[in-house]
Each structure stands twice: as structure tokens, then as C-alpha cells.
Amino acid sequence: MTKNITLTAAEEKLAALIWREAPLTSPELVEIADKEMNWKKSTTYTVLKKLCDKGVFKNENANVSVALTRNELISQQSRHFVEDSFGGSLPKFITSFFGGKKLSPEQAAELKRLIEEHSDIPNESQIRRNGHEGDGNNG
């Protein structure tokens, strides 16, 4: 598994700005950070370097680009959280997350759709569609 990337509050602020504006030049980034966050040039470059060292962005030839999208970072952080906190057990995480509360019909339908979408086991409609119901051949 890849290294867990955590961002400080300052890194999160600059990351949000870069994800919104990228690609851009580092001088453009300095200008926007100054306008929107009142950051000095040195602060922007220091935080940008930390984000680049963490593999979130690249700063090559004064051009800042995205190495990890916001969704990729959140996905990676979520996987690490489930692995560290629940021994990698998604069912344990979901049970803990809902804490005894009932799912709404919409939540249940969405979870079912996601499970089917990401599962190696064919769902009922796939079995019927492929004509393999009951023959032991699911491929």
C-alpha cells in the first residue's frame, strides 16, 4: 500500500487553490495566494514544496501541475483509514459508520449499486443476461 498522505491546514488551503486553478505557473500561484490568502511569496513556495515532496503536485520549470487529484487523495486516505482503524474490513467500517442507524432506501440502493459495480461476483441481472444461472460457469 502507498504511503498515507496527510495535509496540514496550510497545505489543504494551497492544495484547494491549486486544484481549482491548475495548471498554472508558480508566479501565478504566488499572485493568487497573495490575493486570496494574503500569503507572502516565501510562504507559498514553502508550502508548495511540501506538497510536491508529498507527491500531490509537481513544480517543474515554474509550472505547477496536479500529480494527485483531490478524489485520488481522498480515496487513498480513506483506504488507509479503513486499513489502520478496521484491519482493512469494509463491513466493520460501515457498521461503525452507521452506528446502529438505519439506512434510507436511497442509501441502501446506492450501496447495493456500488457493491455490484465493484464486485467480482456477478449480480443477478448479469447472470440472467449471460444465461449462466445455475450452470456453475460465471465467466
Image: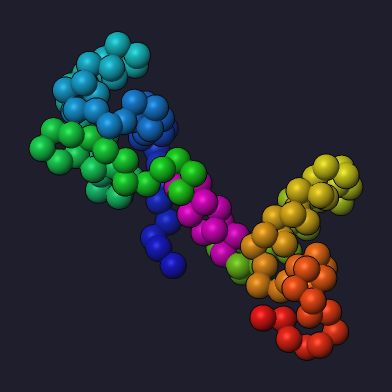
Quarter that holds the C terminus: bottom right
Q: Is residue 82 magenta?
A: yes
User: Which residue is rendered at x = 18% and y = 28% of the image?
Assistant: 26
User: Which residue is rendered at x = 54% and y = 58% of the image?
Assistant: 79
Indicate whether 28 appears above or below 71.
above
List x then y, in percent, for residue 32.
28, 17
Quarter holding residue 82: bottom right
Quarter holding residue 115: bottom right
Q: Is residue 14 magenta?
A: no
Region rendered in magenta: 73-83
List x then y, in percent, for residue 96.
75, 55
List x then y, in percent, for residue 72.
46, 49
Indicate whether 108 appears above or below 115.
above
Q: Residue furthest bottom?
A: 136
List x then y, in percent, for residue 35.
30, 11
Residue 14 appears anywhere in the view: no
Q: As drawn, is 100 to the left or to the right of 136?
A: right
